[in-house]
Image: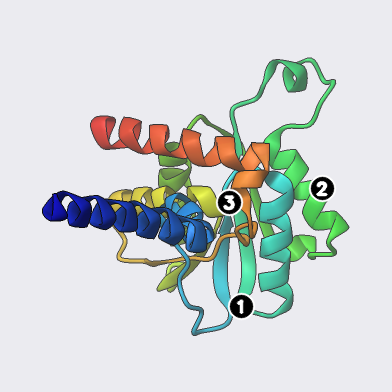
Amino acid sequence: MKKKIIKLNFSIFFVFFIFTSLFLFRNDLLQLPAKLIEKRSALSEKGQVGIILMGGFYDRSVQMAKLYKKKWVKKIIYAEAEIGKAEALGIGLSQGQMVDKMLDHLEVPKEDRIFIQKTRNTSTFDEAKVLLLAIKERFPNAKKVILVTSWYHSSRAEWIFKKVNSFGIEIISVPNEMPKNWWEKEAAFLSVFNEYLKWVYYLLNY
């Protein structure tokens, strides 16, 4: 009987300990899924070429403009994505055009921007191949590039660029900031969920 009481007390204590720990460290635990797919590198050398990937044009353009104004980036390059139905009908802007206009708004000089308009990239894989080749052709002495994308896309984007990088260029991932409580925002929550699905797809197909 005494042993049963001791076991019961231990079980109650163990359950209490688990739930207390989960409550106390709930924010750290909730941050974990996002932190696993965020890749942020340290900046060490100014005057690099910067790449903006298509999608999430507002946050990515703002991040790149910050890097440009702090002189981490001297030239910015980006390539057009696949044109949607609205853009084809002339009743909307393409992703590349939105980035271009956003950089205008943020007062990034046109002479320091290279917009590759003829491409119709449908994936980050396509973008990586086009942009790395363009950098090698236009900046043959470039040893590093700063890669700007959304925080949730950053680890997969870096992985893709490294996978197709045949030029020995160092990829420095500097995405926009992760929201503090990302799980409270529907768009961020869905972006993290979708990013895990995309990781599975890319690992299986590339």
Secondary structure under the numbered disc 3 in the rendered image: loop
Q: Is residue 36 visible?
A: yes
What residue is shown at x 70% (from left), y 53% (from top)? 59
Judging depth in this view, the residue of 130 and 19 nearest the camera is 19
Secondary structure under the numbered disc 1 in the rendered image: loop
Residue at the spot of label 3: 150
For the view shown, which residue lies furthest in the front direction?
Answer: 1
* Residue kind at label 2, given as amino acid type: Lys
Judging depth in this view, the residue of 169 and 5 nearest the camera is 5
Where 15 falls versus 171 (above or below)? above
* Residues at discs 1 and 3 in contact (Cβ within 8 Å): no
Where 180 falls versus 203 (above or below)? below
Disc on the earlier residue, 1 or 3: 1
Is 16 left or right of 101, judged from the image as shown? left
Judging depth in this view, the residue of 168 and 191 nearest the camera is 191
Q: CA distance from mark 2 to mark 3?
A: 18 Å
Q: Position of residue 12 (x, y in %)?
A: 32, 52
Q: CA distance from mark 1 to mark 3?
A: 18 Å
* Residue kind at label 1, given as amino acid type: Trp
Disc on the earlier residue, 1 or 2: 1
- In the picture, residue 96 is in which quadrant? top right
Secondary structure under the numbered disc 2 in the rendered image: helix
Residue at the spot of label 2: 101
Residue at the spot of label 1: 72
Q: Position of residue 103 (x, y in %)?
A: 78, 56
* Residues at discs 2 and 3 in contact (Cβ within 8 Å): no
Q: Is residue 116 visible?
A: no
Tell me the quarter of the image containing the C terminus: top left
- Judged by depth in the image, the label closer to the viewer, 2 or 3, is 3
What residue is shown at x 66% (from left), y 72% (from top)? 67
Q: Position of residue 6 (x, y in %)?
A: 19, 57
Q: Position of residue 52 (x, y in %)?
A: 60, 53
